[in-house]
Amino acid sequence: MCESKRASIQNSEVIIRGDCKTVIDQMNGDSLPRKQKSYYNKAFLMRRKLESEHEVSIYFQHVTRDQNVLCDGMCKVILQHLQRYATENVLNSIRHIEKDYHPFRLPDNRKKRFAFIETPFYKPLNEIALWSGHVPISLRPYIMCEMLLASSRTGDLVAMRLVGTAMYKESLRLYKNRIDLKCADVVNDLGLVGMKATYTSLVEMEIHQEADKIAKHISHKYGAANVGFVTEQNLHTLQCRLPVPDKSDEKNRLVMESISSGDQIERLKEWEDNISKQILSEGYAQSPFFFFT
């Protein structure tokens, strides 16, 4: 920074505003950080460095969400772009793998066959199954269905087993995160299809002991009538009830208009409120706002 600019801000007060009360309280010393302590330490050191180098005093001020509609909307637009890119990247990866798929030989030893995970689908599955990155939680079941269909069409039994297991674990995590009760039947079917896919692959790979364990689990949790191979009809029926990737830019358009014209902010807030009401009334699968999870 040039000396003239440095002199102009010396002994000034710098106010940083944010709508996360937890962060503001921690930076003001009103509460102690716990899980975010490493981030707090970095922010604290950065604050002290700025105050020392530029001879300013930095304060933090909480802004309530209703007074922060435009900034909140802009952040969501950025998040939507990241989520859309991540989702399209995973879906394209699945399509490319299926198109250029080359069959591979499974180990002859049964134990090694069960532990085998070297499938081309492993990398994209890992990206969505770990709940990391920018793929929205609400789209993960749909993408897993796409991957299961692709692995079925290519005859990749290893991928079928891994995706099936991931789908079942996804259903458990959605239950654990207290999803809306209106979506409980969809999540239940997600777990069932996942278990049936795992059972199918194990039988086809002639790992009968593990397949019998899965069959008993299906019978106990979902009923004996549901024990059997997974079918494409099972997957298509499930997919029809899941959120799908959306290409609507209505949110982006309203936010960009709000930036250039202040009178659009109320329209943006009204749009947010309407979407929130729709989510609450119609539930998980019918919501067009699934990108922001």
Image (spheres, grey):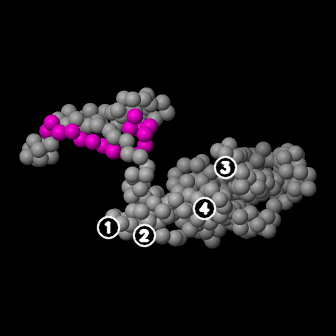
Q: Quadrant of residue 104?
A: bottom right
In the rendering, at what x and y percent does residue 44 appear? Answer: 33, 33
How far apart marks 1 and 2 lie (CA) works out to 11 Å
- Looking at the rendered image, the disc whose residue lies closer to the viewer, 2 or 4, is 4
Query: On the image, numbered disc 1 is attached to which residue?
Result: 260
Do the CB atoms of the residues marked 2 and 4 lie less than 8 Å apart? no
- Crowding near the residue tagged with mark 4, few <14, some 14–19, many ≥20 C-alpha atoms within 10 Å: some
Residue 155 is left or right of residue 225, and the answer is: left
Quarter holding the C terminus is: bottom right
The answer to whether 166 is drawn above or below residue 56 in the figure is: below
Residue 108 included in the magenta stretch of the image: no
Mark 4, secondary structure of its residue: helix
Residue for point 38% across, 66% down: 264
**Residue range (magenta):** 10-25
Query: On the image, numbered disc 2 is attached to which residue?
Result: 253
Please tell me which of labels 3 and 1 falls first in the chain.
Answer: 3
Q: Looking at the picture, which amino acid does disc 4 mark?
A: Gln
Query: On the image, numbered disc 4 is attached to which residue?
Result: 278
Residue 11 included in the magenta stretch of the image: yes
Residue for point 60% across, 61% down: 278
